[in-house]
Amino acid sequence: MSDEVVDRDNSGHSGLTEDVASQMPHGPAALLEILLVALRLGLTSFGGPIAHLGYFKTEYVDRRRWLDAAVFADLVAIAQSLPGAASSKLGISIGILRGGLVGGIAAWIGFTLPSALALIAFAIGSQALGSEADGWIHGLQVVAVAVVALAVWSMARSLTPDRQRATIAIIAAVISLAVPTTVTTVTLIVVGGVVGWRLLGSDGEGAGVAVHVRISRRTGLIAGSLFVGLLVGLPLARSAVDSQPIALFDSFYRVGALVFGGGNLVLPLLQPEVVPPGWVTNDQFLAGYGAAQAVPGPLFTFAAFIGAAAVPEPNGLAGGTLAILAIFLPSFLLTVAALPWWSELRARQDVRAILRGVNATVVGVLLAALYHPVATNALSEPRDAALALASFGLLAIWKMPPWIVVVATAAGGALLEAIA
């Protein structure tokens, strides 16, 4: 694998230029690399979508240099501004930049497969997590604090280098903590963009070269049309045909298309879709949700549990697969629809000013999230904070691979639980 995949444009940001993109690895070997890197993230990324940003930045920006911090932050802003699974949209975007449309699919499969298979197996086996696993699970929550703290620290240094952007970040953090809702987050991102456009203006530097995206505008328009068409057409098909697979696909697609913020916000949207029809009981629903918290990868894979539990054996695997495809399809279509336009717009000074405001806002939102829900849920006593600090030191100072720190911190959580 070549590390020379970033180039420096006149704006001071690195991007994937046409020349660099032409030198990037192609073919099955490149796609296999994308799949395996995403698979490792899917096996080790505990802590939910906010923590995933830290894992992604460490792997894709710091370690492999597939893109730089500014491009990464732009992709984060796009992922958080669109409905669907935020961390999955980010992974799909990076996969597309690296390997085109098929690269995006490979990145999604790798990141999603481990937790999806684990939750399908849990549903089919009707097993519950034992109390002996509590310490390990708590350790995984603690390591998320260190991962998010590292992400906030490194992103703040590159994205809020001046007083104006630092102020935007602090204001965003204050408002996020005071009014912690999804509407607040989306509103802050929009307002941050407007403030960037009006106050940050031109930085006096050249527009540089737009980031190269290996999909066309036509492909983007087709993806956007499919997104809208399925959103409208699936309910019509469901009402016309009495079919559980169609009903399942419609329910999960609609949730994936309408939820902003992802993660835990899936819970209140999915429950009325799957419990009243009798697909799963409320106890099954809550048990599956608990299991989803204990596995790495995107929380949207909770859908795999429900799909597998809703379909009688021996078709549980098919039900879980159908549900997982349906709930993630909107995220994929929206990402494909947005990226070709972003590639060209990003080179414009006014758009870059908007993105500077949005990126500073994202830092503030992540700073607020570091406190709540990440730290408030994970750090209940001083020894938890000590474990989180040790994990942060391993990541930030000793540059240990994230998966090793995850395993070590989980073991530390188990040890603390045993001696309590």
Image (cartoon, rainbow, N blue to C red):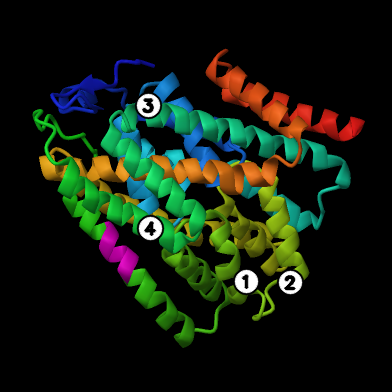
Mark 4–mark 3 Cα distance, whole angstroms, equals 23 Å
Mark 3–mark 1 Cα distance, whole angstroms, equals 41 Å
Q: Secondary structure at mark 4?
A: helix
Q: Secondary structure at mark 1?
A: helix
Q: Give amino acid for label 3.
A: Arg
Query: On the rendered structure, is 137 left or right of 208?
Result: right
Q: Residue at coordinates 21% horizontally, 58% vertically from top-left?
A: 221
Q: Residue furthest right?
A: 419
Q: Secondary structure at mark 2?
A: helix
Residue behind mark 1: 271
Q: Residue at coordinates 36% horizontally, 55% vertically from top-left?
A: 188
Query: First in sequence: mark 2 or mark 3?
Result: 3
Mark 4–mark 1 Cα distance, whole angstroms, equals 23 Å
Residue behind mark 2: 282
Query: First in sequence: mark 4 or mark 3?
Result: 3
Query: First in sequence: mark 1 or mark 2?
Result: 1
Give the label, 4 or 3, closer to the camera: 3
Asked whether disc 4 touches disc 2, contact meaning CB atoms under 8 Å apart, the reply is no
The numbered mark at residue 60 is: none
Residue 230 image position (x, y, % from top left): 37, 70
